[in-house]
Image (cartoon, rainbow, N blue to C red):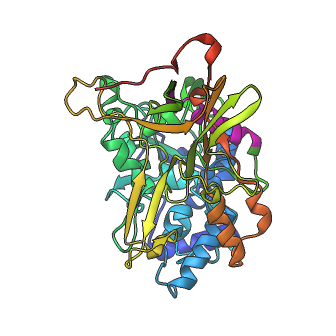
């Protein structure tokens, strides 16, 4: 059965049609719903958007070997009870069309049903919940977007939708309801949308707020489609923290975009004191640029840690947070390690990293700002300080760095050891270092503290 015939059969089963209103003349519409479902179709008129999407984690979502491994392990561990819990966000159109019920056949899905596709997002007409992908699709062939005056065109009908407009707070519900995940045991596994809702960024844009699109879809002045007028269009690359771990379009560009986004996320201050033969290194961090907690998303798998090194001359006098040769920061044996992540616990209150076993979680995260100033209503303390103390002479210099591993080496190693993941994938997991949080204190400068001073109550 050909791809288009397959999709056509599924649409008939759903009772879907290509009818409906729109800004464009219906008589001029030339593309069927089946054709619009294929991102390659979109590339004909939206070449740059397609190029960006094709190298994004949305396009990679159902191909990611870690996702495939974790989903397979979860399905086997629960005897299939996991169902479409994972795949409904990683290949939502495939689920909507009945092409998969559990994601175990994700690798065999037709290309146009893999990942989060153009058609899926631009067909959303309703958000009927706050988590686990409660989106309602139209399936009427009308492509929704953020332009209030869509141009009539012979390819498809178009309509304005507040759900797709970056200047609309409502648009955050479209993104957020897929990026908040609640497990069958009612554990709030991923809370990015909820974190944003409680932050200063959830204000209307007219009051200084920022939607998901405002941070993760950079704007540019360009035609939205070939031959169209110049408008304020937006990138469809959506950099965050995760990256492709296998060969994939725009792979290096994706990593560079993630690096740029992470670089400005945290503000840091580094202070060094010595009294009575004891050196006291004080590190203060504050989340100033993430519109949610940091890290966020799959925080049970994220690894964010602080590295501190104190030197006398070229000799290392003290260190904490140094990544071991095997790349697993959780096995560093460092009692002073400042590690930011979620920790999951099962019903017996034993640690687990398997989300289907989780009954509760603990967090050590950097919260997002809730107000501009400590005197403003609703302000909560967003900076965190950690002391590193050791006996010795005053160091000549102290170096500070903050590192991010999208998924911990310990999680990957466990998937490898149980046969669910190829070992070669582990080597492709990067460690990012945040530029704005990196500081060096030097005794010769005569300062106790270096770096910007975060807000304080």
Please determine whether, in this image, residue 61 is positioned above or below residue 439: below
Residue sticking out furthest to the front: 276
Name the spot of residue 13 as percent of width and height, x first.
Answer: 49, 77
Q: Residue at x 51, y 70 (%)?
A: 95
428 left or right, relative to 229: right
> Which residue is pictured at 44% across the width and 32% down the height?
286
Q: Depth check: 197 or 91 in front?
A: 197
Task: In the displayed orientation, state which residue is furthest to the left.
Answer: 377
Residue range (magenta) = 252-269
- Towards the viewer: 290 or 344: 344
- Residue 16 is situated, as x and y percent measured from the top left of the image, at 46, 67
Q: Is residue 386 above or below residue 408?
A: above
Q: Residue 201, can we see it?
A: yes
Prevailing secondary structure of the magenta residues: helix
Q: Nearer the viewer, residue 26 or 192?
A: 192
Query: Is residue 139 visible in the rendered structure shown here?
Result: no
Seen in the picture, residue 197 relative to 119 is either above or below; the reply is above
Query: Percent position (x, y) of residue 182?
Result: 38, 64
Closer-to-camera residue (365/396)? 396
**In the image, is residue 446 above or below residue 289?**
above
What residue lies at 41% left-to-right and 63% top-to-bottom? 132
């Amino acid at each position: 059965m050909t791809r288009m015939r397959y999709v056509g059969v599924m649409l008939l089963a759903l009772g879907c049609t290509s009818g409906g209103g729109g800004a464009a003349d219906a008589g001029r519409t030339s593309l069927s719903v089946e054709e619009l479902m294929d991102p390659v179709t979109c590339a004909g008129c939206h070449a740059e958007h397609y190029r960006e999407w094709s190298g994004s984690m949305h396009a990679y979502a159902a191909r990611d070997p870690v996702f495939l491994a974790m989903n397979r392990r979860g399905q086997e561990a629960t005897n299939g009870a996991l169902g479409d819990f994972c795949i409904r966000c990683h290949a939502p159109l495939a689920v909507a069309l009945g092409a998969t019920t559990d994601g175990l056949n994700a690798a065999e899905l037709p290309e146009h049903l893999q990942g989060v596709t153009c058609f899926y997002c631009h067909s959303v007409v309703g958000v009927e919940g706050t988590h686990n992908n409660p989106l309602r699709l139209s399936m009427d062939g009308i492509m929704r977007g953020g332009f209030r005056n869509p141009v009539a065109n012979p390819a498809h009908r178009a309509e304005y939708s507040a759900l797709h407009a970056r200047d609309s707070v409502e648009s955050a519900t479209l993104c957020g309801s897929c990026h908040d995940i609640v497990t069958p045991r009612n554990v709030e596994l991923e809370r990015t949308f909820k974190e944003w809702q409680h932050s200063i960024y959830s204000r209307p844009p007219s009051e200084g707020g920022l939607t998901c699109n405002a941070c993760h879809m950079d704007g540019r002045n360009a035609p939205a489609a070939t031959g169209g007028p110049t408008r304020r269009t937006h990138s469809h690359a959506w950099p965050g923290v995760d990256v492709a771990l296998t060969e994939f379009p725009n792979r290096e560009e994706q990593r560079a975009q993630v690096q740029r986004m992470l670089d400005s996320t945290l503000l840091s201050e580094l202070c060094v004191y010595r009294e009575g033969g004891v050196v006291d290194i004080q590190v203060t961090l504050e989340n100033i640029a993430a519109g949610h907690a940091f890290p966020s998303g799959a925080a049970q798998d994220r690894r964010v840690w602080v590295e501190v090194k104190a030197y006398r001359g070229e000799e290392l006098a003290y260190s904490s947070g140094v990544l071991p040769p095997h790349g697993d920061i959780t096995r560093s044996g460092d009692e002073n390690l400042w590690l930011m992540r979620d920790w999951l616990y099962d019903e017996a209150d034993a640690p687990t990293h398997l989300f289907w076993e989780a009954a509760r979680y603990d967090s050590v995260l950097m919260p997002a700002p809730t107000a501009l100033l400590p005197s403003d209503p609703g302000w909560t303390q967003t900076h965190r300080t950690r002391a590193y103390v050791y006996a010795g002479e005053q160091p000549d210099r102290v170096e500070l760095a903050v590192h991010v591993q999208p998924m911990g080496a310990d999680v990957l190693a466990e998937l490898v050891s149980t046969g669910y993941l190829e070992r070669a994938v582990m080597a492709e997991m990067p460690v990012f270092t945040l530029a704005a949080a990196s500081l060096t204190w030097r005794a010769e400068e005569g300062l106790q503290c270096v770096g910007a001073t975060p807000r304080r109550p």
